[in-house]
Amino acid sequence: MEEIKEIPDKDIRKLYRPRVIDPKISQLLRISGGIQITGCKWCGKSWTGIYHSRSSAFIGTESGRMVAEMDPELVLRGEEPRLIDEWQDVPNLWDVARMNIDFGARKGMYIFTGSSVPPQNSTSHTGTGRFASVTMRPMSLFESGDSNGSVSISGLFDGKAVVSSLSKMNYETAVRLICRGGWPAGLTMDADDALVIPRLYSESLINSDLSRIDGIKRDPGIVRSLLASLARNNATTAKTPVLAADISKDGPVSEQTVRSYMDALRRIFVIEEQPAWSPSLRSRKRMRTSPKRHFTDPSLAVACIEAGPAMIINDPNTAGFLFESLCYRDLSIYSSAFGGRVSYYRDDSDLEVDSIVEYGDGRWGAVEVKMGYKDVDKAAANLLRLKNKLADETVGPSFMMVLCATGGAAYMRKDGVAVVPVDCLGP
């Protein structure tokens, strides 16, 4: 079992690329006995876990798994915080660590990382009161160095003025960033080589990952068809019957099967659901409640339809849905810094706003996503319509923003709507 007793500055501190969630992890280590970092594979959980730990054990290796099964206490022994990477391969580690936290009565004992949710009933305790949880995603544009971060989401909530800043983004650049994705390993690669990462990920999903999480054998052909259907319906509220009908063209697939496969995709953090937002528990408006579905990174959607930058560039409609997923990813990452979440609004009059960013204390901001600068006026009008429609039901938005791929600069319109290229946005 690979062991790291100390983390030399030259090995990690100088190489590690900071993540938005880092301050949250540091805080949780001060107040909880342990933390659990979850998220899809290859998003950087292990690297972040090593950065915040003082010793580590890697359960994903065959030898590490064998030792953990024979002697959990040995694996958990080491300088604290102790990283246990891919712990879900030996779920009993969770219960042993929980007991150690109870008896040790110390903070920041363990960092558990995992790229899937263990099967139900594989642990005897949820960890409530002992473990705090945080979710990691692939890198945002700010984390990967592709955004200057001059417009801060937190700053907008605090009423800070939008700093006028220049964007380097254009349509082609946006599409290439969508296809590359936020995978840390791709940042040091040649641009064409980086495009291979999401393709490898999708093939891994099809051939092994979905069966490995719980030992249930799943048909690779159905997995491939379902992933392609989800990619074609990316950033929409397409329901199970629609997906089942779509993938049944090559042979009947039941809705129950689709639900089972979808649950597996959620458990390995490949698919995320963006919930619908209701401004008030007593709202008189009839709200749409079906969640939107996104791949955890838009590059996976591109890979699952076997496309690339050239194909997406020539299909602006598909590019628009993929860009919405990129913006959802980044908004979710930035809002995680203050414990917020990202939902969407749609009512029975078909008024829809792409993203509602909630702060957690009742404040909220409304965001429309547009690839092209020519659509900014229409998007701004939609945001103002929402503000006026909810004027008698809730506190008004802290900000209204059009998030775009082109436009040249971030600025504030006279009507109070901020226009921000996505490569100017940050936490």
Image: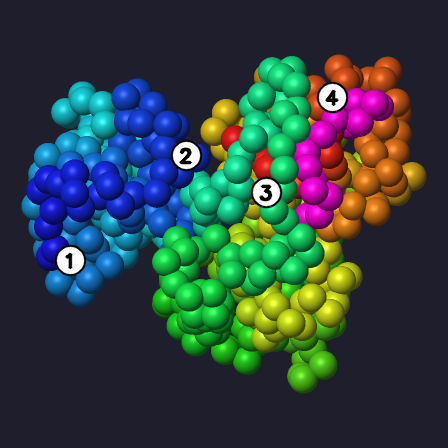
Residue under the point 76% across and 62% down: 316
In this view, the mark in front (1 or 3)? 3
Q: Is residue 9 left or right of residue 219?
A: left
Q: Earlier in the sequence, mark 2 or mark 4?
A: 2
Residues under labels 4 and 1: Cα distance? 50 Å
Q: Amino acid at mark 2?
A: Ile
Disc 3: CA contacts within 10 A as few (<14), some (14-19) or many (>=20): many
Seen as rendered, the residue at the extreme right is 349
Residue under numbered circle 2: 21
Which of discs 2 and 3 lies nearer the camera? The answer is 3
Residue type highlighted by circle 3: Asp
Q: Magenta stretch?
A: 403-417
The structure residue drawn at horizontal position 71% and vertical position 47%, both measured from the top left corner, is 406
- Residue 398 spot, x, y in % from top left: 70, 20
Q: Residues within 10 Å of mark 2 (few under 14, many from 20)?
A: many
Q: Write down the residue under mark 4.
A: 397
